[in-house]
Every structure is written in C-alpha cells, then in structure tokens.
Amino acid sequence: MNWRQLFDDRNKFFWVLQLTGWIGYGLIQYLGSFTQEMRDIYMVIVALGAYAGFLLTIPLRYLYRRIWNRRPAWLFFVVLVASFVTAALWAVIDNATNWEIYRFGYRPINPLFYFNYTIAKWYIILSWSGLYFVIKYYQMLQDEKQKALTAASMAHQSQLKMLRYQLNPHFLFNTLNAISTLILVEENKAANKMMSRLSDFLRFSLDNEPIKRITLAREVEVLMLYLDIEKVRFEERLQVFTAITEDAARALVPSMFLQPLIENSIKYAIARLEEQGTIEINARVEVETLVIEVKDNGPVAVHEIPKRSNKGGGVGLSNTAERLKALYGKQYSFNLFANDPTGCIVEIRIPWQVV
C-alpha cells in the first residue's frame, strides 16, 4: 500500500499516526530524561505512560467525530473540557505508575505539583486534539478539491464532446445534399464514390472519442477521406498540397479539428472559384510549439477575411477556436491572415506534445 492509498483510508491512516505518534512521544520522554537515574525500569515507566496516552486519546477521536458539525464555540468548549479530563486521568495513571513501580511505594503528592503536572499533560492532549482537527480539516479540503476537479473535468469533457459532435450534423447535411444533387443529375458513379468515402469518414468519427487526441499524421490521413469526398464534387478544380515535418507529424492534436477549417476553405474559396482552387496544409515545430497553417487561394480580399470568419452560425472556425481554448487555455493562438495574392491563411499555434 502506497502513501496515497494510506492517506485515502482514513481509519488506517489514523491508527498509523496514533501508533507512531505515541511511540515518538515515548522515545522523546526517555531520551530527554538523561538527568534521571537511567535504570531499565525507567524505560518501562515511560512506555506505560505513552501507552496510557495512546489508550486515553482513542475515545477523544470518537467524541470529536460526534460533535464535528456543532457550532465552533461549542466545539471549542468540548475540546477544552474533554482534553482536561483526559489529561487529569493520564496524570493520575502516570503518577500511580511512577510511585508504585519506580519509587517503590505510594507517597502523598503535593496538590500544586499534581495540578501543574496535569496542566503539562493537558498541553500534550490539546496538541493531540489540534493535530487531529488540522488533519481532519485538511482531508476534508482535499476531498472538496478532488470533487471540484472531478466536476470540472466532467464539465470540460462534456464541453469538448458537444463542440466535436456539433460538427457531424453540419458536415453530414452538406455531404448528403451533394450526394442528392449527384443522384438528381444521374451521376450515380460519383454519388456512390462519395457515399463510400462518407462511410469511411463517419466510421472513424464514431470510433474515436471526441476528448482524445491523435497524432497529426493520423489527423491528416483522416482529413484526406473528407477531401476525397469533396474531390468527387469538384474533380480537378480542387488540389490539395501538404508539407508536414517529421516532428510535426508526431504531435498530438484534437481529433478532427482540421476538418472544419478545410470545410470553411471549400465553402468560401474553392466553391466560388471557376478555375482551379488549391488548399495547402503546412505544419512545423518552432521552439516546442506546433504551428499549423491552412491556406487557400479563394477570391477573398483582405478586408473580407473578418466577415468570412464570422459566417456559419458559430460552427466551423469559431467551433475550432472554442475546442482549442477548452483544451489549451491560454497556450494557443488562432489567427486569420490574407494569403498572397488572394485567399486566406488560418494559423494555429498549440503546445508541441508527443506520445
């Protein structure tokens, strides 16, 4: 059993601390009494005193557990009284043991000496009580912290799932519309090819959890399934180029986070071009940062780029930005630039992380 498991098991943790604490107390008492006549019998006296303290503080644990939720003033009062009563009993046992075993017979005790001795024991019991409450409150804070982390993690995962699943109906609607159009114009071969690619793409989508990450190489591989679907529609009008370094290909990225960017380029760039359209996917690593660029040559002027990023009803670019924010917090950037001579560049910077 490791320390974390021991800490989580409150009952075992208490007994380990109780045992080691009173053993430590006994050793300190014995080693600190070098002025006493160090007979072997004195070790027995010290051991009996520590054992008495061990036994007398056990009921305090159950008492404190019963009054744990009472008002602070009442709790404080009970702790003071219970500690004093326990200290008084301990002092009686300690003195009886000391006189009967070590001093060889009972002798009358000065009441003032006995009172001062009880007060000294009281401080020790109060210290025990203070440690009990400190550890108990710390355990409660750890429990609340763990609950908060679990709740935050569940909310975070729900948000990521929502953002990811939001893409599927959007993409599916567009693709089925395209297949329907191909069937209407009797392009059955093209429609069948597109349906086959759609099946492969959706199979990947269903087999991968939205909150998990995959390598960029795998992400681009799946992205090509989507582009194959679009190539059925645009044929030679759509050309795709990739330039991904070896380090970038090994990087972990959110699954299917590039698909809405490509869809955005196709919708606002390729679909509006009469001549050949191109999409470039570049990725490289710069000082522990993964830099990904998606470029197109669409007929978009520089001043129209902000308008393009705001279209789509919150799906697409904004969806990708929200997913990156949920995953990386402030450790990401998402920017739009004008391409040369025309078109748009989407640049994403996220931490470079590998398996």
Image (cartoon, helix red, strand yellow):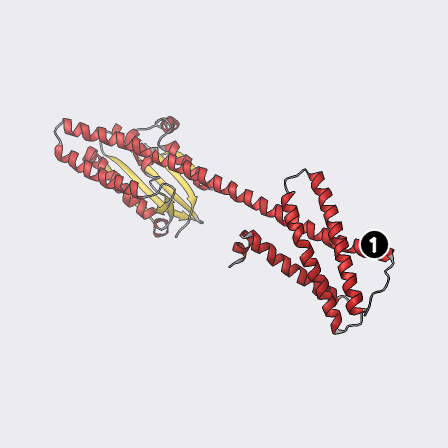
Q: Position of residue 2 (x, y in %)?
A: 52, 58
Q: Secondary structure at mark 1?
A: helix
Q: Is residue 345 left or right of residue 10?
A: left
Q: Is residue 82 left or right of residue 262?
A: right
Q: Position of residue 215 (x, y in %)?
A: 35, 48
Q: Quadrant of residue 270?
A: top left
Query: Could you tell me which residue is drawn at 60 percent across and 58 percent down?
Result: 16
Q: Is residue 54 above or below residue 351?
A: below
Q: How many marks?
A: 1
Is 129 or 54 nearer to us in this picture? Answer: 54
Q: Position of residue 62 (x, y in %)?
A: 63, 49
Is 38 or 58 nearer to us in this picture? Answer: 58
Q: Is residue 275 left or right of residue 103?
A: left
Q: Position of residue 304 (x, y in %)?
A: 36, 26
Q: Residues within 10 Å of mark 1 (few under 14, many from 20)?
A: few
Q: Is residue 148 above or below residue 39?
A: above
Residue found farthest to the front:
106
User: On the image, numbered disc 1 is attached to which residue?
Assistant: 115
Q: Is residue 256 left or right of residue 14?
A: left
Q: What kind of residue is marked 1?
A: Phe
Query: Could you tell me which residue is drawn at 74 percent across and 73 percent down?
Result: 40
Residue found farthest to the bottom:
39
Is 89 or 330 nearer to us in this picture? Answer: 89
Q: Is residue 176 above or below residue 148?
A: above
**Is residue 216 in view from this perspective?**
yes
**Is residue 298 in view from this perspective?**
no
Query: Could you tell me which residue is drawn at 33 percent across and 28 percent down?
Result: 300
Query: Could you tell me which residue is drawn at 69 percent across and 55 percent down?
Result: 56
